[in-house]
Amino acid sequence: MQRIVVLVSGRGSNLATVHQRCVAEGWPARVVAVVSNRADAGGLAYAAEQGIATAVVDHRVHATRQAFDDALARVVDGFAPDLVLLAGFMRILGAAFVRRYEGRLLNIHPSLLPAFPGLHTHRRALAAGCKVAGATVHFVVPEVDHGPIVLQGVVPVHPGDDEQALAARVLATEHVIYPLAVRWFVAGQLRVEGGIVRHTGGASQVLI
Ligand code: GRF
């Protein structure tokens, strides 16, 4: 059984879909803990309801980014993870933290990377007149919203879309691609060579 720890800062809808698919499909894995920098994160409430262990590492009580990262790593290590997922975790993690979990740290970002790293992705995609948008699951590297791409979900941008409409469409594809990427990881079906991720069984790594 592979042990998954999920880091969240907010509502936790990606956490919920990964957890639900893991249980429903009987993956050789389970979500053993949900850790947040915010005590009021919806994802923590979901975890508690599901009987999943929770922990809070409040960034505000740590004087430096390094101190926060060290405290977070101590908590995460306490759950002995095989895989750590960032699922709407809104703190930038330092290089030492990222390297500690290198190769077993995934993130989901609501854009088709390398376009639009950072915040306000939907607003920026609309302002650029993009005709497609989407989300990316990638291995985490020290540079924020970069790293080997596991899987991308593509959705159309419709004329008349506002930020909310586009965000909702992208979120729907997030809820498909994150569980799929995690399932591939726990099944040992991902290989990273030269910064490129391949599915060993040749599965399509784009969902349109
Ligand atoms: C998602 O859009 C994810 O791509 C981004 O943060 C949001 C988290 O949403 N990194 P949720 O907390 O999983 O509902």
Image: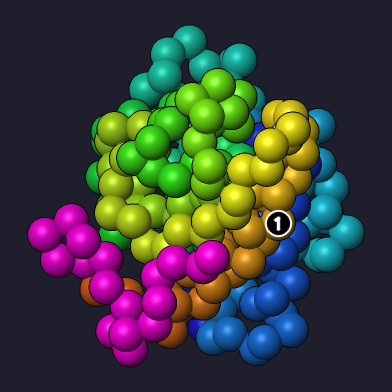
Q: Amino acid at mark 1?
A: Ala
Q: Write the residue at 14% across / 66% down.
A: 193
The x, y position of residue 34, in whole percent, is 66, 52
The segment highlighted magenta reads 192-208
The kind of secondary structure element at disc 1 is: helix
Q: Quadrant of residue 37?
A: top right
Q: Residue at x 59, y 54 (%)?
A: 155
The single residue placed furthest to the left in the displayed view is: 194
Q: Which residue is mark 1?
A: 172
Rendering quarter of residue 16: bottom right
Where residue 58 appears, x then y in whole percent? 63, 25
Question: What residue is drawn where x is 65% and y is 88%?
Answer: 26
Mark 1: is the Cβ under 8 angstroms from ligand 1? no
The quarter of the displayed image where residue 52 is located: bottom right
* The one of 161 and 35 positioned closer to us in this rendering: 161
**Label 1 neighbour load within 10 Å: few <14, some 14-19, many 20+:** some
